[in-house]
């Protein structure tokens, strides 16, 4: 029961973070001038590159533990589908958006952006 609460809490944090970035920050940042937009993005990446993995990884581990602990009980197909979707999300994040964000972070070293 406690693991269920922890898992739901952590997955909720991940979903909330993604929701806020997607529907809150992106639109607001798109309205900014280019230089300010880049500086804002760089600042966010510097903070979120530590915070987000500290939430994502335990959420995924808790989800896998719950999947294993549930055994063959009712709803197993839904749990497997959830883990598959979470795995795809993590892979796309770590191999897709993270490298892009790290490149944007490197732009701060450019004299134009200082």
Image (tube, helix red, strand yellow):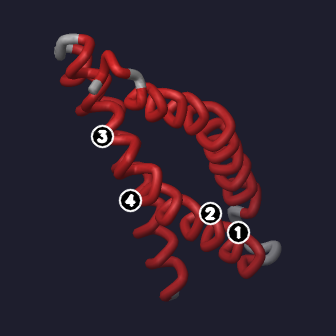
Marks 2 and 3, how far apart in space? 26 Å
Nearest-to-viewer mark from 2 and 3: 3
| 82 relative to 68 in the view: left or right | left
Q: Nearer the viewer, residue 52 or 49?
A: 49
Q: Secondary structure at mark 1?
A: helix
Q: Residue furthest right?
A: 72
Depicted 6 relative to depicted 26: above or below: below
Residue indicated by mark 2: 60
Instruction: Count neighbours of disc 1 (C-alpha within 10 A) and say few if under 14, some if 14 to 19, many if 20 or more.
Output: some
Tag 4 near tag 1, CB within 8 Å: no
Q: Earlier in the sequence, mark 4 or mark 3?
A: 4
Marks 1 and 2, how far apart in space? 6 Å
Marks 4 and 3, how far apart in space? 20 Å
> Measuring 19% from the left and 24% from the top, which residue is drawn there?
28
Residue indicated by mark 1: 64
Marks 4 and 1, how far apart in space? 17 Å
Nearest-to-viewer mark from 4 and 3: 3
| 31 relative to 78 in the view: left or right | left
Instruction: Count neighbours of disc 4 (C-alpha within 10 A) and say few if under 14, some if 14 to 19, many if 20 or more.
Output: some
Q: Position of residue 88 (x, y in %)?
A: 69, 41
Q: Secondary structure at mark 4?
A: helix
Q: Secondary structure at mark 2?
A: helix
* Residue 39 image-quadrant placement: top left
Residue indicated by mark 3: 43
Q: Position of residue 77 (x, y in %)?
A: 75, 55
Marks 4 and 2, how far apart in space? 12 Å
> Measuring 65% from the left and 70% from the top, which residue is drawn there?
61
Tag 1 near tag 2, CB within 8 Å: yes
The quadrant of the picture occupied by the C terminus is top left
Residue indicated by mark 4: 13
> Measuring 63% from the left and 43% from the top, which residue is drawn there?
94
Q: Earlier in the sequence, mark 2 or mark 3?
A: 3
């Amino acid at each position: 029961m406690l693991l269920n609460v922890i898992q739901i809490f952590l997955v909720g944090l991940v979903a909330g973070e993604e929701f806020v970035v997607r529907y809150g920050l992106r639109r607001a940042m798109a309205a900014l001038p280019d230089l300010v937009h880049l500086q804002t993005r760089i600042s966010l990446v510097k903070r979120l590159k530590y915070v987000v993995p500290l939430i994502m990884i335990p959420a995924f581990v808790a989800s896998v533990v719950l999947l294993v602990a549930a055994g063959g009980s009712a709803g197993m197909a839904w749990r497997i589908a959830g883990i598959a979707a979470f795995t795809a999300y993590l892979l796309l994040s770590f191999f897709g958006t993270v490298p892009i964000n790290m490149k944007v972070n490197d732009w701060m070293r450019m004299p134009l952006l200082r």
